[in-house]
Amino acid sequence: MTSGRTRAADELRPIRITQGYTEMTPGSVLIEMGRTWVLATASIGDRVPRWMHQSGSGWITAEYAMMPGSSDRRVRRDRYTGGRQKEISRLIGRSLRSVVNLKAMGEVMINIDCDVVQADGGTRTAAVNAAWIALHDAVRWAMAKGMIDTDPLLDRVTAISVGIVDGVSLLDLDYHDDVAASVDLNVVMTGRGLLVEVQGTAEGLPFSREELDGLLDLAALGIDHIGALQDELVAG
């Protein structure tokens, strides 16, 4: 099976990021990566989970869901019980916490909601990219309100998918790439180039260490580009 891809192997889909997409939360970002659109919103509360009470530490959690009309078949409104939703929610939460000093937040809770408006592959990586910007904006809002005294953000976090289709390593898989891929990886990295998460699967034959290293190098190229966009937006 082939993907029918028209982009170069190392080319990202067109990316557009809109900050302040909604008005009711201190952080809201719509990211469009090709035909994949994800809305990330960040809400702030003054109650951390019960197991963290009196710890002096904050917490960041994330929830991921696909909206009913995001696919060609209606997606059920199931935010909490679906295994895939839980897995991706945890990935997003882990990715964000990896670049935050939770102690510096005090006992502040930040909830990130990532809702897929339209899905064409790479929804979890798009969600991570939007979620970090929404988190950044929410932290700045909380600091301005005196809810957080010290900037807890240590670095940025960025994600992208890569894979192998017909023996060729491809960056930023859309749905048709993903279906045709013999190897599929999701990679999350910090701004310093440290790995946060690598989720990889051989859909057919096993792949070599050399191929894995090549995919990670390709992912780093895409992450550098997306990270530059993130940096530009939060600096503005």
Image (cartoon, rainbow, N blue to C red):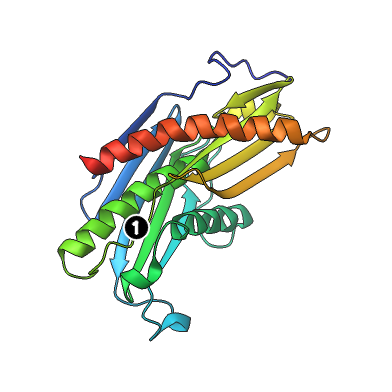
Q: Residue 34, position in %: x, y?
A: 44, 26
Q: Nearer the viewer, residue 152 or 173?
A: 152
Whether residue 52 is visible, yes or no, is yes
Quadrant location of the N terminus in the rendered image: top right
Quadrant location of the C terminus in the rendered image: top left
Residue at 55 percent across and 21 percent down: it is 10
Label 1 crowd bin: few (<14), some (14–19), many (20+), radius 10 Å: many
Residue at 39 percent across and 33 percent down: it is 32
Outermost residue on the right side: it is: 205
Three-letter code, disc 1: Leu
Marker count (numbered): 1
Q: Which residue is mark 1?
A: 153
Q: Nearer the viewer, residue 79 or 186?
A: 186
Whether residue 19 is visible, yes or no, is no
Q: Where 150 falls versus 46 (above or below)?
A: above
Outermost residue on the front side: it is: 192
Location of residue 38 (image quadrant)? top left
Q: Residue 187, position in %: x, y?
A: 57, 42
Q: Residue 68, position in %: x, y?
A: 47, 45
Q: Nearer the viewer, residue 113 or 77?
A: 113
Residue at 67 percent across and 34 percent down: it is 213
Q: Nearer the viewer, residue 229 or 173?
A: 229
